[in-house]
Image (cartoon, rainbow, N blue to C red):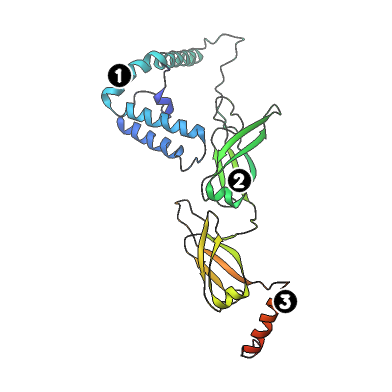
Amino acid sequence: MVFKDYYKILDLETSRVSIDEIKAAYRLQAKKYHPDVNVGNKLAEERIKDINEAYRILSVPAQKRKYDRIWNNNVGRTKLGQNKMDRGYIFNMFLGNVEKGKEKPQIKTPIKGENIETKIEASLSDTFFGKEKIVILKNAEGRDKSYTIKLPEGIRNGEKIRLIGQGKEGKNGGKNGDLLIEINVKEDSKFQLKGYDLYTKLPISPWEAILGAKIEIPTIDENTVVYIPQGIQTGEQIKIPQKGFKNAQGERGDLFAEVKIMIPSKITKDEEELYEKLKNLSTFNPRIN
């Protein structure tokens, strides 16, 4: 069975800590690696499992005492030996017993690695449904390294996904930097996004505009039926509630369909005769208010 250093997982240096200190450390780590902050980050998902497991063991005094015996055998003795060596060196240094010709051990400060930032393009549909995307970057050796990320549903243009620990390597034992992926949402040929509402064009025939109609139109995720009222004009909008984009909570905006009355460029002889008859029968004149 693989030994896990629960104290290290909670960023604690020693087993000599109180339950309150363990709880405080747990809250900090759980907040840092929470899924909502690290969407699509597989490493963070595994880390939060270890954090929860560590807290479950160390927060119960009886289990903590049992674990501490194992911890002392695996980690405590090593740390104790290191502490004795450090104290011995300091003692000798002040007594002038440091051997000549030997360099003093230098304590190097851990340095976190730099973050890496990149951008990827995604369609409006990709961000709406939260599809997977592949990101390919060059590593330090110049080789391609690929990352598969799942876009959070409803992610917006310019928002970033953070992959913890996937940036440049840290120095002197420091943590690796993070990989920040900015999402650029491409313009869509059918829909325009404003806030959480979507806007689209709705072409209809002259007789649908005059008589009214029930027609099926596409939304971003399915087709839906709308009713065209009699006498609707070009430029008027039909509102379809809760068929817009979604936010992080899954709530939907509205879809607004702008009507555009389309005139046929070619008509049959019968149609022409009917339009002539309509012209003679109708009293409508659009140039008279």
Residue 75, quarter of the rendered image: top left
Residue 116, quarter of the rendered image: top right
In the displayed structure image, the side of residue 61 where residue 51 appears, left or right: right
Residue ID at (29%, 20%): 65
Q: Between marks 3 and 2, how big is the CA–CA gap?
A: 58 Å
Front residue of this view, candidates 252 and 217:
217
In terms of secondary structure, where does tag 3 sit?
helix
Of tags 2 and 1, which is closer to the observer? 2
**Residue that label 3 marks:** 269
Residue ID at (46%, 31%): 47
State whether residue 244 appears in this view. no
In terms of secondary structure, where does tag 1 sit?
helix
Label disc, if present, on residue 276 of the rendered structure = none
Front residue of this view, candidates 152 and 92:
152
Mark 3 or 2 closer to N-term? Answer: 2
**Residue that label 1 marks:** 66
Of tags 1 and 3, which is closer to the observer? 3
Location of residue 283 in the rendering, given as x and y in whole percent from the top left corner = 61, 90
CB under 8 Å between callouts 3 and 2? no
Q: Between marks 2 and 1, how big is the CA–CA gap?
A: 46 Å
